[in-house]
Image: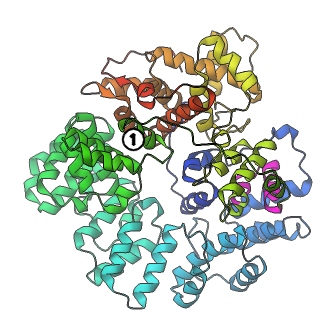
């Protein structure tokens, strides 16, 4: 999507909903699922909604807003609606949470929940309600019933529920040090702490399982995300809270001020403060970030750095070319932080190579070469291996037929047709949980045949040993895109890589800021491009037209490419974040860097992941469409410092 900004979701219920996306889509599909959950498979004008459909959608909204009275009244009018389980769920769920999304311990919905879980046992929706119910039972500290339900919770993807599970074990007297170790592995992102996780931390602290400095670190994680109320729930407030707040607001001022008084506080507090200041300076690409991180590094206590700070310390060192700092920072990373992103395996290997230990570097890279992502591609090239597409395993027609008659997939399509993509994805992906590679390929083929390209991609992405990359990287609308791209000299494989990331080929995908269609074009951008290419009769409503969308999106992509000296890395970033930002990021480079380092150090989380995915996608599209051996490193190129010059591009 063009020029979108990543927004923080503060409402607690929405944060819980984000956790739910983990089973609504794979991690590679996460941004797409959030961005397009309101999208439809067809144009809204093509969908014939009955009065009951409209009432059902109204019920869904009431449930989302935890309006129990409205949900009950609407649900009673839908007693004969064809998805009775969702009608019931949408009535029960608002009885479990208040308007701010916090679980209600005193709810009187026990019997309703119990009946639902028994009646719909084994379904995706029962597991969703069980997730909700576990939050209520945890809030009550009803550990007997919590443990019974937790044992049946299939997805187990909610951080709050995991914290309650550890609280239950703590209440039973399990060794506190073991519980503290497990807690460290799950407490990585304060957005998902809710009520349960601070209570867990405080209990472990009182039992001497956490030091006061560790508890302060959890509080600091919340402050770094501007969750002040959450930060205050921890028994040990962060002594450096004011410094963190100052760094969040103006890291340059915080750096100057703390440099004058760092000697006044303990070594542990000084480490924490320099870490947060370094993080915020690094996000502004300020060279003083490395000075702050080096001051922290000399003092040690690396375990007191928040996960976000640990990662930005590596990125700052990459920008400066300080490979020893890269290696030592990754060495000191919390194990769970190091494992959650293959970036740190790749850059650790690079640091080993740059520091002269090529044999260890090769050993580290070897762990990535069979992983089909950005870092797997880089690792293969570093080992002198080709980026390749695995041998195609064609879909078994008998299995495709089974998929086409599967009621869960049919129900998902039903939801897509009335605009409930989030629920459709939930039903679809639940059915994929225990399928073999051959079955997954067949389901992906079925999805492709009925025009659900996003489900084809998502499903094919799950295979482990047998693959069909033509389903992972499909090329719909080729008869339209190829001549459009060819007429302006745009690489079709790169364009497909971008479309796959932008919309997953959902023709009328909509973003929360108004970007539309396959290439997620903003209306203002569309008007600008249309005028430039002589499409004088253009109207914003035409963005739903496939050819118009491809024409405007492709031309804009080509425009930002020319504006950014032909760099795919810079142009991809510009398409996502706006053309001015990559120019500012490039201007602040201390030296010429590899495109991979530029991508790794992009300050926006969404844009950083976007650029990596688009270019990795393009490699596989190249491998599938020609006899050429793709080179990710070549496509990334080098990025050199250059003064930022404003352009008229929107």
Task: From the image, tell me which residue sits under label 1.
Answer: 379
Residue 101 visible in this rendered orientation of the protein:
yes
Residue 626 painted magenta: no
Q: Residue furthest left?
A: 263
Position of residue 544 measured from the top left corner of the image (x, y, whole percent): 75, 30
The colouring scheme, among rainbow, by chain, secondary structure or one colour, is rainbow
Quarter of image, res 132? bottom right
User: Which residue is painted at 18% across and 56% down in the image?
Assistant: 271
Q: In the rendered view, tell whether residue 395 sits above or below residue 584.
A: below
Report the magenta stretch's main SS. helix
Query: Going by the image, does 190 lie left or right of 506?
Result: left
Q: How many numbered discs, if any? A: 1
Q: In the rendered view, tell whether residue 438 sits above or below residue 168.
A: above
Magenta-highlighted residues? 407-426
Along the viewing direction, whichever of 389 and 499 lies nearer the viewer? 389
Q: Secondary structure at mark 1?
A: helix
Quarter of image, res 314? top left
Position of residue 139 measured from the top left corner of the image (x, y, whole percent): 52, 80
Along the viewing direction, whichever of 308 and 235 lies nearer the viewer? 308
């Amino acid at each position: 999507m063009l020029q979108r900004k990543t927004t923080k979701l503060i409402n607690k219920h929405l944060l819980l909903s984000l956790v739910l996306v983990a089973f609504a889509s794979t991690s590679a599909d996460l941004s797409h699922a959030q961005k397009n959950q309101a999208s439809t498979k067809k144009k809204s004008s093509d969908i014939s909604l009955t009065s009951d459909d409209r009432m059902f959608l109204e019920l869904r909204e009431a449930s989302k807003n935890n309006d129990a009275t409205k949900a009950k009244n609407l649900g009673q009018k839908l007693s004969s609606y064809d998805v009775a389980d969702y009608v019931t769920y949408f009535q029960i769920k608002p009885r479990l949470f208040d308007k701010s999304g916090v679980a209600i311990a005193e709810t009187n919905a026990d019997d309703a929940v119990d009946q639902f879980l028994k009646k719909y046992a084994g379904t995706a929706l029962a597991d969703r309600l069980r997730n909700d119910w576990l939050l209520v039972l945890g809030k009550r500290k009803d550990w007997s019933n919590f443990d019974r339900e937790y044992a049946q919770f299939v997805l187990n993807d909610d951080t709050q529920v995991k914290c309650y599970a550890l609280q239950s074990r703590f209440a039973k007297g399990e060794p506190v040090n073991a519980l503290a170790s497990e807690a460290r592995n799950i407490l990585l992102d304060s957005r998902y702490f809710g009520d349960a996780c601070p209570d867990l931390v405080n209990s472990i602290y009182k039992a001497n399982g956490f030091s006061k400095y560790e508890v302060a670190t959890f509080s600091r994680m919340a402050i770094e995300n501007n969750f002040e109320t959450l930060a205050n729930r921890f028994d040990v407030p962060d002594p450096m809270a004011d410094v963190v707040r100052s760094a969040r607001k103006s890291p340059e001022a915080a750096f100057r001020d703390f440099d004058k008084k760092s000697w006044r506080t303990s070594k542990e507090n000084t480490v924490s403060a320099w870490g947060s200041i370094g993080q915020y300076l690094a996000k502004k690409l300020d060279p003083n970030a490395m000075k702050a991180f080096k001051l922290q590094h000399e003092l040690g206590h690396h375990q007191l750095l928040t996960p976000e700070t640990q990662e930005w310390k590596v990125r700052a060192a990459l920008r400066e070319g300080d490979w020893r700092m890269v290696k030592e920072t990754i060495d000191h990373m919390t194990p769970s932080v190091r494992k959650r992103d293959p970036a740190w395996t790749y850059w650790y290997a690079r640091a080993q190579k740059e520091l002269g230990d090529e044999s260890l570097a090769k050993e580290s890279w070897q762990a990535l070469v069979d992983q089909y992502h950005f870092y797997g591609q880089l690792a293969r090239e570093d080992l002198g291996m080709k980026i390749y597409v695995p041998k195609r395993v064609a879909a078994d027609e008998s299995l495709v037929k089974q998929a086409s008659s599967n009621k869960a997939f049919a129900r998902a399509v039903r939801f897509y047709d009335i605009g409930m993509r989030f629920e459709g994805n939930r039903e679809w992906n639940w059915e994929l949980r225990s399928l073999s590679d051959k079955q997954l390929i067949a389901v992906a083929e079925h999805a492709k045949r009925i025009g659900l390209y996003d489900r084809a991609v998502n499903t094919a992405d799950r295979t482990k040993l047998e693959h069909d990359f033509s389903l992972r990287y499909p090329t719909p609308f080729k008869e339209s895109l190829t001549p459009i791209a060819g007429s302006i000299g745009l690489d079709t494989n790169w364009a497909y890589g971008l479309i796959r990331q932008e919309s997953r080929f959902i023709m009328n995908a909509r973003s929360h800021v108004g970007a539309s269609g396959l290439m997620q074009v903003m209306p203002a951008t569309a008007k600008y491009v249309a005028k430039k290419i002589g499409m004088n009769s253009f109207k914003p409503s035409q963005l739903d037209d496939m050819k118009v969308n491809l024409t405007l999106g492709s031309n804009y992509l080509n425009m930002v490419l020319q504006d950014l000296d032909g760099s795919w890395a810079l142009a991809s970033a510009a398409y996502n974040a706006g053309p001015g930002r990559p120019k500012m990021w490039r201007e602040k480079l201390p030296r010429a860097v590899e495109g991979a380092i530029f991508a790794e150090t992009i300050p926006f989380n969404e844009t950083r992941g976007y650029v990596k995915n688009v270019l990795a996608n393009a490699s596989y599209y190249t491998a599938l469409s020609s006899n050429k051996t793709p080179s990710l490193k070549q496509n990334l190129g080098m990025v050199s410092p250059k003064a930022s010059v404003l352009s008229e591009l929107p």
